């Protein structure tokens, strides 16, 4: 990844998708993956960070991301990788198993992977999947950025209470984010750039 000032936005170009390792891009650049439940707002976050409304498809139906999608950041020369969501997708058990296997293969085998952005709706509590992802990234030495989405949906008192609970869940410090109000956008941008460059030291530290 080329060094430089923190970006005002990510200059992302969609480069393709993959279902298996044989279809991954044959490049040597660093990759930062984005993971979360199928209704956590991954597509909205990608569009917000890229300053475009058409970068990633936003759907009212959870589970629309059914392949691993790759976006190359052309200014800093790394890639964001959109992983299929987990949890509530309205798909068959066979499809859920296939998505899970594709994500597991990517996380275990992709040597380019430098960091993981883990998203969670601020109104939810981290469950087994979030803890497993955090433990797995730690075991591989992959840095983790925790992002609590949809903070615009909570009032000040409720938001403060939720972040106390999230920060005490044992995963690290959560960054509040809203694609509607753009709150937290700059902090997430700095965090993603730090993950790609290997400069983030601790989970949630941006």
Image: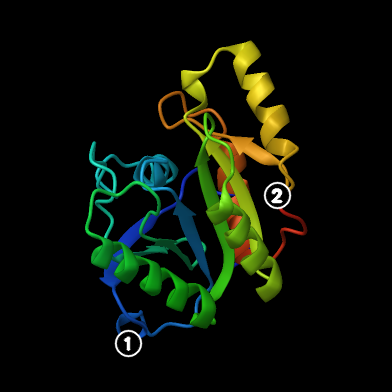
Of 16 and 100, the residue lying toward us:
100
Which residue is depicted at the point 24% across and 44% down? 54
Left or right side of 101 for 90 = left
The answer, for residue 9, to whether it is visible in the render is yes
Figure quadrant of the N terminus: bottom right
Residue 126 figure quarter:
top right
Q: Is residue 170 above or below residue 96?
A: above
Identify which residue is drawn at 62% across, 55% down: 131
Classify 10 Å Cα crowding around label 2: few (below 14), some (14-19), many (20 and above): some
Question: Can you identify the residue that label 1 sits on?
Answer: 22
| Residue farthest to the front, as pictured | 93
User: Is residue 132 shown above or below 123?
Assistant: below
Q: x%, y% of residue 130?
A: 57, 52
Where disc 1 sits, the SS reads helix
- The part of the image, by quadrant, that contains residue 200 is bottom right
Q: Is residue 1 visible?
A: no
Q: Which mark is residue 171?
A: 2
């Amino acid at each position: 990844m080329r060094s430089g000032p923190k970006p005002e936005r990510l200059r992302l170009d969609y480069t393709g998708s993959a279902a298996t390792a044989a279809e991954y891009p044959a490049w040597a650049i660093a990759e930062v993956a984005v993971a979360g439940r199928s209704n956590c707002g991954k597509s909205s976050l990608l569009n917000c960070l890229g300053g475009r409304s058409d970068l990633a498809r936003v759907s009212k139906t959870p589970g629309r991301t059914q392949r691993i999608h790759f976006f190359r950041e052309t200014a800093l020369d790394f890639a964001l990788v959109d992983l299929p969501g987990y949890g509530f997708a309205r798909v068959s058990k066979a499809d859920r198993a296939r998505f899970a296997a594709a994500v597991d293969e990517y996380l275990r085998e992709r040597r380019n992977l430098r960091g993981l952005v883990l998203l969670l709706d601020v109104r939810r509590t981290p469950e087994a999947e979030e803890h497993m992802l955090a433990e797995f990234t730690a075991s591989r030495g992959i840095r983790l950025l925790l992002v609590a989405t949809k903070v615009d949906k909570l009032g000040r008192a409720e938001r403060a209470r939720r972040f106390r609970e999230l920060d005490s869940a044992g995963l690290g410090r959560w960054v509040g984010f809203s694609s509607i109000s753009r709150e937290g956008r700059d902090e997430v941008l700095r965090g993603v750039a730090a993950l790609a460059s290997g400069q983030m030291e601790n989970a949630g530290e941006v």
